[in-house]
Amino acid sequence: MNSIKSLVMSSCLRNKDKFSSIITKYEEHGILHSEMLAVCSVIQNLDINLIIESGRYNGQSTEILARFFSGTKIKIVSIEIIKDQNAKYVEEKLKKYSNLILLYGDSKDLIPKILTIYQKGKVAILFDGPKGEAPIKIFKKVICDFPKVNVGFFHDMRKSTEKMPNPTRKIMKHSFNRVFFTDNNEYIENFKQLDYPIIKTGIWRPWMKGNNKIGSYGPTLAVVLPVSTERVMESEEEKTTTSNLISFLKNTKNNLKRIFTKKVTNFNLIENIKYILRNIKKVIYDK
């Protein structure tokens, strides 16, 4: 955790001035400027060659990426699910950027196709759609199939509150070993001033979603650097064995607790020990 925090913080401090100079007008429901700083800075630091953006909406983050990496070797492929009237407006807004390719379709299908075609260099993926657990599942799959995927960014990863739950945050924390969230206190203190122009417009307020208080400063971006063990997809058989082992260990814990608290008869004690031994044999020999 500390290593990824150090990477994100140092990268952002180094690129803050450049980022401040290319900020575009904030679009409602977009990624905050302080969050996009992390995206651009980490990509710059990791010497990425290709950025895939999943979820374009009004094109705010797309334009920031295009402006920040203008004149560099980095290419940006942006995916939006459907081509509607809003998409036409965004196309018109972004047509001046030669480092952009705009695609339409399901990211689950398009991202592997793009990665199959793109044979060289390092890749970063920014997810701002689909929402929920879907982008985590997509990323888990592609990092196993494509080692060139070096980093992932996931929007809307705020902390949960009782009134405003966000189960995706917990899923994210349990899915990856090296993950950093931009609602980190040190990060907020260093870079929140980038969001002051947004606050002045009244479109967004810190610690709020609409009229509801939330558990984080903002929608929150997660930065993920995959480790080698996360690049191996478990087979269904391995998942079943793991699940059986976890279930067995839970049952063993309960049985041992009952034995040592003397809540069983001598007969039940023998039966419980036999049960534990049978299950150890079952797990070891998978029978």
Image: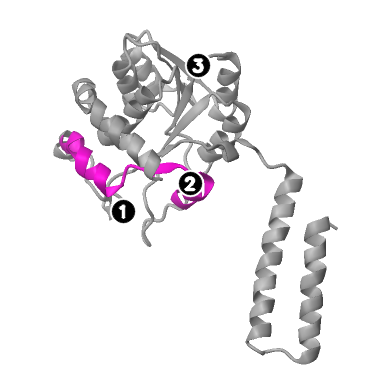
Q: Is residue 146 above or below residue 232?
A: above
Q: Are marks 2 and 3 in contact (CB under 8 Å)?
A: no
Gap between marks 1 and 2 measured at Cα: 18 Å
Which numbered disc covers residue 172? 2
Question: Does the segment drawn in magenta span residue 118?
Answer: no
Residue 161, image quadrant: bottom left
Tell me the amino acid under the disc marked 3: Gly
In this view, the residue farthest toward the left is 200
First in residue order: circle 2 vs circle 3: 3
Report the number of numbered marks: 3
Q: Could one spot residue 22 in this view of the protein?
A: yes
For the C terminus, the quadrant is: bottom right
Q: Nearer the viewer, residue 98 or 130?
A: 98
Which is the main secondary structure of the residues drawn in magenta?
helix
Q: Are marks 1 and 2 in contact (CB under 8 Å)?
A: no
Q: Are marks 3 and 1 in contact (CB under 8 Å)?
A: no
Residue 174, given in percent of the width and then of the height, sits at: 51, 50
Residue 99, image quadrant: top left
Tell me the amino acid under the disc marked 1: Ile
Gap between marks 2 and 3 measured at Cα: 26 Å
Question: Does the segment drawn in magenta span residue 186?
Answer: yes
Going 40% across and 20% down the picture, which residue do you hit?
47
Q: Is residue 192 above or below residue 77?
A: below
Image-based side of 109 in relation to 71, left or right: right
Q: Nearer the viewer, residue 119 or 228?
A: 228
Image-based side of 22 in relation to 81, left or right: left
Q: Is residue 113 above or below residue 238?
A: above
Residue 197, given in percent of the width and then of the height, sits at: 16, 34
Q: Which residue is mark 1?
A: 214
Going 82% across and 62% down the picture, which residue do you hit?
282
Helix, strand or loop under label 2: helix
Going 78% across and 91% down the picture, which residue do you hit?
266
